[in-house]
Image: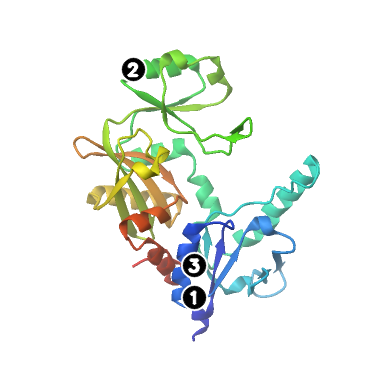
Amino acid sequence: MAAAEKKAVLVATEADDVTADMVIIELNRRSVPVVRFNPADIGADLAISARFGTGPAPVTGQVRTPSRTADLTAFRSVYWRRPVWPAFDRFGADDARFAAAQVRYGLGGILYALHEPLWVNHPLRNAAADYKPAQLAVAQRLGMAVPPTLVTNDPAEARHFIAGHDRVIFKTLRWTPYQRDGVPVTGWADLVTAGEIDEGVRVVPHLFQAVVDKVADVRVLVVGRRVFAVRIESGMLDWRRDYSALAYSVVDLPRHVEKGLLAFLDHFGLVSGSFDLAVDKADGLWWLELNPNGQWGWLEEATGLSMSAAFAQLLTHGDAA
């Protein structure tokens, strides 16, 4: 086996990640070595050492888990799936904050220093693409239809916008773990009226968006240059509320939309992403948002699309053909 073929894929994700498992199974089937780790395991179950300025290579070192030891220069690609950073709850507040920062800027910094492997996706590029206002502006510049949207912390502006459209939804600007009385709360896309807007809006920016008069949704997964599009029938404003009520069909996107989505990823330096689009009564497609690292495993199971194989191909060879 050639030296390049022996290089491993580094998979960074949480312990229970069925989607990552699907990709790892495909990599195993191709006899590609895999090193899986989670930043939250730092300590006895995860050790990393890196050396700088000690040789011709900018960085050398090793990453060690209970089952694997691999050189930092021996990775062909990094699959940055759903890693969890340690919170150090056993420490006091100041010590926990200090320790968490050292892991992010130590472990994270070592990994970010690796320029040879293909990143799917690089976490810094994921972060840059995760701002919804920036997404909306880029999508419109690339010629995609964007629903009228307002981001504001001015109650008067919000009321005026809502009054000017038939139906308006409120969406969170970023998903954030949240609990009320110990019960997890999820932020769905919900209808909002002008009468519901109060002075609390001033505290933070809010995203308000005119509702697309849709008949269905489309989730699009892009892996390298491969595009997988699935139409989702639900009859719901937010189809994520009840997965058991969904129906799926594989569809082909109009060429100009496909080109726009690929250009969108290129703009942010991403090689993969999950897009949400809405289908109106005239079969027009409306941009909703991008999740740079969205879920897709259930769609492969529902449709039979070779999504995990495409990821394995991309991580192994740098393309998903």
Q: Which residue is mark 2?
A: 164
Q: Which residue is mark 1?
A: 32
Residue 143 x %, y %: 29, 41
Residue 241 x %, y %: 41, 37
In the picture shown, does residue 275 fall above or below 202? Answer: below
**Numbered disc 2: secondary structure:** loop
Spatial CA distance of label 1 from label 3 is 9 Å
Spatial CA distance of label 2 from label 1 is 56 Å
Q: Where's the C terminus, which quadrant?
A: bottom left
Circle 1 crowding by C-alpha within 10 Å: few under 14, some 14–19, many from 20: some
Q: Amino acid at mark 3?
A: Ile
How is the protein colored in the picture? rainbow
Picture quarter containing residue 73? bottom right
Picture quarter containing residue 15? bottom right
Q: Residue at x 67, y 52 (%)?
A: 104
Disc number lying in front (2 or 3): 3
Name the one closer to the observer, 171 or 256.
Answer: 171
Q: Which residue is mark 3?
A: 24
In the picture shown, does residue 29 fall above or below 166? Answer: below
Disc number lying in front (1 or 3): 3
**Numbered disc 3: secondary structure:** helix
Disc number lying in front (2 or 1): 1
